[in-house]
Amino acid sequence: MGRLMADKDRMEPAWIALCNVDQLGDRAICHTELLDHEVVVWRAEDGAVNVWENRCPHRGVRLSLGHHRGEALQCQYHGWQFNSGSGACRFVPAHPDAAAPPVAVKTWPVEVRYGFVWTCLAPAGEVPPFALIEELEQDAALKADARSQSPSIHLRTIAIDAPSETVQRALADYCFDHARFDLWQTTDCVAFDVAPHAVMIEQLDAAANRVVFLLQPARVGRTYLHGVALGPVALTERLTVQRHHQQRLNVLRDALEQQCVHREPLSNDAVANRPPLSAPQTSPATQPVFLQRSLSKPVSASGSLNDRHFSAAHDPADRAFDIHLSRSRRTVKVAAGVTVLQALRGHGIDVPSSCEQGVCGTCRTRVIEGTPLHRDDFLTPQERAASDCMMVCVSRAATETLTLDL
Ligand code: FES
């Protein structure tokens, strides 16, 4: 048994559950987030599970948009393939006879335990040993009668728009707050930390199953919560138990999101000071000539193959501007050094995005008034001249304000 929950530094290096292994069947490619990193999780045909940065080292497009090639992932943009395990590039379709360039996707360590894929983002050499979660170990070892019982039940994962610390505290509090969590009025519960980012809820009425919640701090203000109801559970009861807990999780999510709706939006400074994505791993000196030629525009003077994209949104001459949102009638300030996409996120407004490098076109947004300062590689010259849409991940404003169709 763990200890009663208390405040502590949740961001110390730890193994964190990312997704259920059942999601990796059928050549599935899972996209998720962890501590502001975009992550792709996939299983190769030999069974090896990979947790990688969700970004092609060539042009920055999300690998989760690509194709599963058995023992490799292929980026959808230029078709580069990356090997399971090392993440090393193995093939570039534009140069089928040349040796693959010495580039690799950023990889993170993987553990598959208790039906989940886990990773740790600590630098190599500082990765702590995997902390066993006693309750889940016992559950896995439980001798359930396979014909009539389940050793445990995975509840569905829910996304909560609240910081993981808030979610973790709420899990500890909910038995005391009957007014807000009225579904539990008749249930006496107590919460325990059982590992970093894992909380167990013990229901003292003994009528229902204990539940272990695994917390995945996705990004600022967003947490994924994976639940496991501990068994044994009669197979005939499985659906009832799932429904019961899922109803609870939905209530928990609604209450937490309500709590967080009045939270202060992140300042532009806080957004700008978030940890950057991993630095590009290659330098022009180590790249074959054909690799540099494969770019449609010159490699930047500062050197790195990816510099142009990693820095597309930041120019020292950038100035602040306002964006008006026509549908919600809100105004958001975009500081110098902060992208429109980041500023919107800081105010809880989510625009679908993918590469975040101005390459894929996912974040294309209609401009109703004002003139955008285009910095993407997606729009045609005619579309740029029309000034009626922009890629909010990289483009800025040429006028004092922009009105967007959001
Ligand atoms: S997210 Fe790909 S262009 Fe903006």
Image: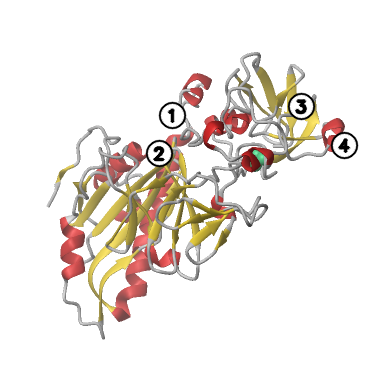
Q: Which residue is mark 3?
A: 372
Mark 2 and mark 4 residues within 8 Å of each other at the beta carbon: no
State the image coordinates of residue 302 (x, y, percent, origin top left).
Answer: 58, 22
- Residue type marked 1: Pro
**Residue sitting at 60 percent across and 45 percent down?**
61
Query: Which mark is first along the chain, 1 or 4?
Result: 1
**How far apart, in angstroms, are the residues tagged by discs 4 and 3?**
14 Å
The answer to whether 271 is drawn above or below residue 378 in the figure is above
Query: Which mark is first along the chain, 4 or 2?
Result: 2
Comparing marks 4 and 3, which lies closer to the viewer? 4
Q: Which mark is residue 143?
A: none
Q: Which residue is mark 2?
A: 35
Mark 1 and mark 2 residues within 8 Å of each other at the beta carbon: yes
Q: Secondary structure at mark 4?
A: helix
Q: Secondary structure at mark 1?
A: loop
- Residue type marked 3: Pro
**How far apart, in angstroms, are the residues tagged by discs 2 and 3?**
31 Å
Is 28 in front, or is 279?
279
**How far apart, in angstroms, are the residues tagged by discs 2 and 4?**
39 Å
- Residue type marked 4: Gln
Q: Which residue is mark 4?
A: 382
Q: Which mark is residue 275?
A: 1
